[in-house]
Image: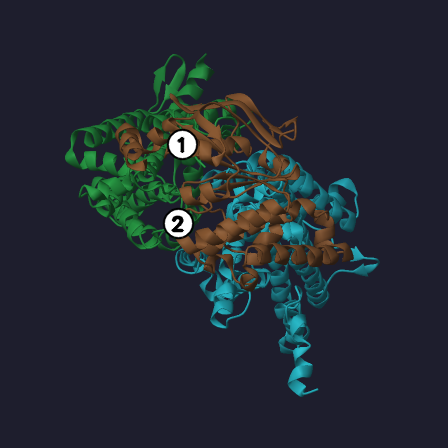
Chain colours: A green, B brown, C cyan
Amino acid sequence: MAEFLQFLFSGLTVGAIYALVAIGFTLIYNASDVVNFAQGEFVMLGGMTTVFLGYAGVPLPFAAVAAVAVATAVGLALYRFAIETAREANAVTLIIITIGASIFLRGAAEIVFDKRFHSLPQLFGSDPIRIGGATILPQSVVVLAGALIIMVSLWAFIDRTLFGRAVIATSANRVAARLVGIDTRIIVGACFALSAAIGAIAGVLITPITLTSYNAGTLLALKGFAAVMLGGIGSAVGAVVGGILLGLFEAFAAGYVSASYKDAVAFLVILVVLFAMPQGLFGKATIERV
Amino acid sequence: MSVLSAEGLSIAFGGVRAVDGVSFEVAPGIVFSIIGPNGAGKTTLFNLISGLRPPDDGCVRLRGEDVTALAPDQLARRGLSRTFQNLQIFTHLTAIENVMVGRHRHEKTGILADLLHLPAVGRQNRHTRERAAAALARVGLEDMADRPAGALAYGDLKRLEIARALASEPTVLLLDEPAAGCNPVETKELEDIIRGIVQEGITVVLVEHDMRLVMNVSDRIHVLANGRTLAEGVVAEVRANAAVIEAYLGVRGAREAAGAVD
Amino acid sequence: MSVLARLGRFRPLLRHRLISLVPISAVILVLPLLFSSAYYYRVAALVFIFAIAAIGLNLLMGFAGQVSLGHAGFMGIGAYAVAIGPIHLGIPPLLSFVLGAILSALIAFVVGRPILRLKGHYLAVATLGFGVLLAIVFTNEANWTGGPDGMTVRQAALLNWPLRGAETWYWTLALSFLIGAALALNLVDSPTGRALRAIHNSEIAARVLGVDVAQKKLMIFVVSAVYASVAGSFFALLNGYITPDVSGFLRSIELVAMVVLGGMGSVTGSLVGATVLVILPQALTSFHDYEHMALGLIVMSVMIFLRGGIVPSLAGVFGGRRS
């Protein structure tokens, strides 16, 4: 039982991060039909930038804010220079463009930072909390709480503000949104910026637990994508559920089956979902008209 | 025996019955036209007959054989060919290459022979090219053979699709609004092409909006409205049918037309 | 007969499907005169290896219009076959080479069936997942593969002629490349080739004309997997050492970049793309750290600006035909 709880806690923690990455994916996908592979790099940038600004003497809270700002700027740049310029490209071309961007960002991180692993101090100390025979790190609680706060804030923003309405409109029908006067470029750009910010915050939160390095982004992007596929592409609820489920699958697989194949779980999930139920748990099945 | 027949074909999308219990029989060697106002279900009916979509109910027979559940490529091998209303041209291929693909069901070499370009492949390529050139000539496009299909004019592309479908040597040819977007000159040329096709013994089933074309080439007309059969018969019968006139012109329009005729 | 008329007799020859191999062969024959050391032979050998893989991927992407972001996985199968066979199973290298290709074909056949039913970004991600999955397996099964640090590869011999030395590899790989290119060019000018190109433009029209689209896609997926496997085996034999990177995500993206850069649907283009992407890191050895940034920039730029690829764009300038 204690073992089960242990896996549950670690699964939920990492699942929360996957959920945040998945939400970032979904925001961008809904607004622009782009599957953004560079999503993982935002998480990496959040963590690494904070770490290195910290080394440079910047107090960590400011470093974290600056890191999020940097990631947001990168997200905007990605949209403006890569996505917007490619305008009429098809889905596959766009994915490859974002893959190119993620490789580029990874390469830049390699040079600007370094190739080692780095960590950040945990927010509330590193004494594990005991629950039911298992332990959970205070930072895990921070991650879960942080993820929850972000999701609720995002929901409130989308649902309650005028800007949020514009996002919904753009997601539903880009052409129609333009026809009613919404500048979809600003909306889509904002979604990229928002996704980047969310990713970066996730990065800052999780680095104390999982460490970070210049190439942490790639695997995260792939796993975030698996979460999105599982939950159903285009569904915000699906993104969250998919992320948490993926985290749990991974933790239990690592614990009960094989630790070295932990990373393979996400890819197995992708393949199984695509073959068995391509629309995921909450997605809509698309009808093709000839 | 009819070469193509539909029995009680039905399909619904969501709550809408796009095709509702449609039946007809097409005798060999005639031009059989399916007409009806917009939204009548003509293209959906075509998709049901050509294997692009399975019907909810009913069956399709090709020369007596039940082909309802067959896929388009299986139908092609049984001699059913079709064109598309919204043009499905192979834009990266030249005109003649488009038509050569139409010969596919007659080409017998497998991938291994193709990779090694065995002598049989060379011979077959020549034969296919000859037949494709002949098909192009039948629709008057022989001069465009080596032009990239993407560069051809709209009217030429409609004829290219017909040539491509003809190249497969079908028994039944389904033409999906071949005159859509064509000017009167092109439509007249189309008439001649269709007559030429029928003279070769191929049965033509036509979905069309252009009434002049339909009246000029059809042997029998089947009228659809709201997914259901409204009328069927020879040109004169359908033309005089009150229900048909009403469906096209509305009740008031029908009265006006009736008033204007005599 | 005038001179021009006599020369005109050669014009049909210029439209022969294999004509592009003539200038390429000429370059291959002449190039060694410029080589001042074994290093250049080796770089050229690498170019041929990746050109082979790129041609295979081009058949799938450029002609049939599919996408595979995990193709390096098949390179990995070929590479590890040729490494594991002799060392762990006592199978001679050349037989391992053939078995690797057969294994790749089988795996492609089994996995291809369900995967190719997908389209667009679903297909892209499924192939991506497949490739990474293979890389994870290669990394984890250390008993067989030597794990993340890799393993050595025993030298091969072609009928008692040992395959070693940069020069030998240059000629062996040049010949292999030419064979691979010839097969691909043959395919283009054949019913299968036309059917594939048709599928690229309109699957539905192809089906309606009698093309078994699913079967054709699967066949070309298998063929392209075999090309990649052959390239991977050569890579392992050439280097004498392999690591799981040979089948990694980055490698798969490099392959895609080669195909797109050179020109989708152009066999010559695959050679050009491979040349650029193999020479670049070599040329940038002093800037080795910038390799990933450069790759990322190339991928982005090519997909945004040069989607037609180098060779078709040049051919357009000179008014020539695609080859």
Mark 1 lies on a secondary structure that is helix
Q: Residues within 10 Å of mark 1 (few under 14, many from 20)?
A: few
A149 above or below B168?
above
Q: Residue at x 51, y 37 (%)?
A: C126
Q: Residue at x 33, y 45 (%)?
A: A45
Mark 2 lies on a secondary structure that is loop
Q: In front of the other: label 1 or label 2?
A: 1
Please indicate whether residue B94 sits to the left or right of residue C29 in the image: left
Which mark, residue C181? none
**Residue type, numbered disc 1:** Ala
Q: How many marks?
A: 2
Quadrant, the N terminus of chain B: top right
Residue A11: x, y in percent?
Answer: 41, 24
> Mark 1 sits on what residue?
B240
**Residue type, numbered disc 2:** Gly
**Which chain does the numbered disc 2 sit on?**
B
Question: What is the quadrant of residue B254 in the picture?
Answer: top left
Q: CA distance from mark 1 to mark 2?
A: 27 Å
Residue A280: x, y in percent?
Answer: 43, 27
Q: Residues within 10 Å of mark 2 (few under 14, many from 20)?
A: few
Residue C301: x, y in percent?
Answer: 40, 58
> Mark 2 sits on what residue?
B181
Q: Residue at x 53, y 38 (%)?
A: B219
> Which residue of the protein is positioned furthest toward the bottom in this rendering?
C2
Please indicate whether residue C142 sits to the left or right of residue C301 in the image: right
Asked whether C4 or B194 is in front, the reply is B194
Residue C147: x, y in percent?
Answer: 60, 41
> Which residue of the protein is positioned furthest toward the front in this rendering?
B262
**Which chain does the numbered disc 1 sit on?**
B
